[in-house]
Image: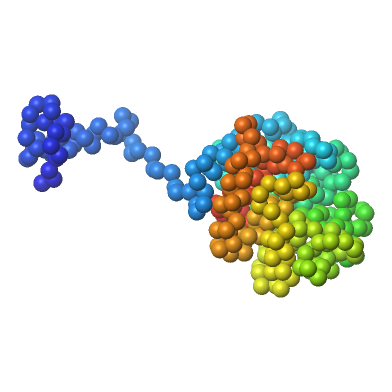
Amino acid sequence: MMRMPAGNILTRAGGCRPSGRCALAGLLALVVAVQPASGQAPPAPAPPLPKHVTPDTQAAIDAGLAYLARTQSRDGGWRNTGAYGRYPVAMTGLAGLALLMNGNTTTQGPYAQQVDRAARFLVDSSTPSGLITRPQENQGKPMHGHGFATLFLAELYGMTEDAERQRRIHDTLTDAIRLIGLSQSRLGGWYYTPESGGDEGSVTITQVQGLRACRNAGLAVPKQVIDEAMNYLKLSTRSDGGIAYRAQMRGPSRPAITAAAVCCWFNAGDYDNPMAQRALRFSKENIEVRPSRANHYSYAHLYLSQALYLSSEEEWDDYFPRMRENLLRQQREDGSWPGDYVGPVYGTAIALVILQLPFNQLPIMQR
């Protein structure tokens, strides 16, 4: 028979000795006392946080997600205006990714309503040509937004439970893929507008990630388009291992674009590619973890974090705790983060992508 500790509640109440039926009655009384009044079992404990995600990190994530939810427009978009202009489609794609990484879908999770509205906004932004854009998108330079919107919708596609909604997303992505293929330059890249015929690194990388996400989701993506895009990265590689702003342009390698290119190689499973490894080494040597005044700090870490997370656990263990502490220090009282010169929705979405990578939610960013 289990012994009750001295001074238990029955002894104090009536002097009953902790033995026999009295002890059993005391044990039952304790069990009843801790049960909810409804008779239901107590709620299951929260799952443990992933490695390196501290309670303070989770609190910062929660505050950032709440900020995005508060700043979403009624029509589902985000209209943050910064020094570079306004990017409603790009910001909605990035903010939507941050919400998906929290485990939300159009029907599940605390921010399901926000995800649903973002999806509607982007699907409704699809034009007859297949370009996902709005008239005010960065003064007529819509291809960045098209890439981020394609990425978000492709990641959401497999999570969508409503058949009609899934069909609309499928049709939007099919048109988006066709537009990307038609607007590819002769060198294999993309530029700010689909009809330009030109190319540059950052726009090219957003299209490649969008196409990879579509392919992962089971949509048909022409292999030739992907192959030519990956060859564009090869043409853009410089002798120091970095990636140039444009394939046929003289000038120094760009660290932020180089980190983004690494993600393209790694998303393709090409981890051992010598160009990818040299580009990763260049990125680590030229992108500072501490906050800096360098242009495109947030953009650089959006991709460097993914590259290091996909690279190895050792690389991630070295990078993430330092980046995490920097991000916790930079967060504002309203839950937002500054975002280079683009604005707080941009900065908040990117910070949340980085901080939520350890939760391993999105296929395009999974190990």
- The residue under the point 90% across, 62% down is 249
Along the line of sight, which residue is nearer the eye, 294 or 21?
Answer: 294
Along the line of sight, which residue is nearer the eye, 111 or 275?
Answer: 275
Question: On screen, 68 above or below 199?
Answer: above
Q: Is residue 29 left or right of residue 244?
A: left
Q: Position of residue 145 (x, y in %)?
A: 79, 47
Q: Position of residue 318 (x, y in %)?
A: 57, 58
Q: Position of residue 170 (x, y in %)?
A: 72, 51
Q: Is residue 160 left or right of residue 196?
A: left
- The residue under the point 33% across, 39% down is 41
Q: How is the image coloured?
A: rainbow
- The residue under the point 87% across, 46% down is 141
Q: Position of residue 32 (x, y in %)?
A: 24, 34
Q: From this viewpoint, which residue is outermost toward the top?
A: 13
Query: From where the camera sits, is residue 223 visible?
Result: no
- The residue under the point 21% across, 35% down is 30
Question: On screen, 314 above or below 43?
Answer: below
Q: Quadrant of the C terminus?
A: bottom right
How many labels were placed on the picture?
0
Q: Is residue 117 left or right of residue 126?
A: left
Residue 328: quadrant of the picture: top right
Query: From where the camera sits, is residue 305 visible?
Result: yes
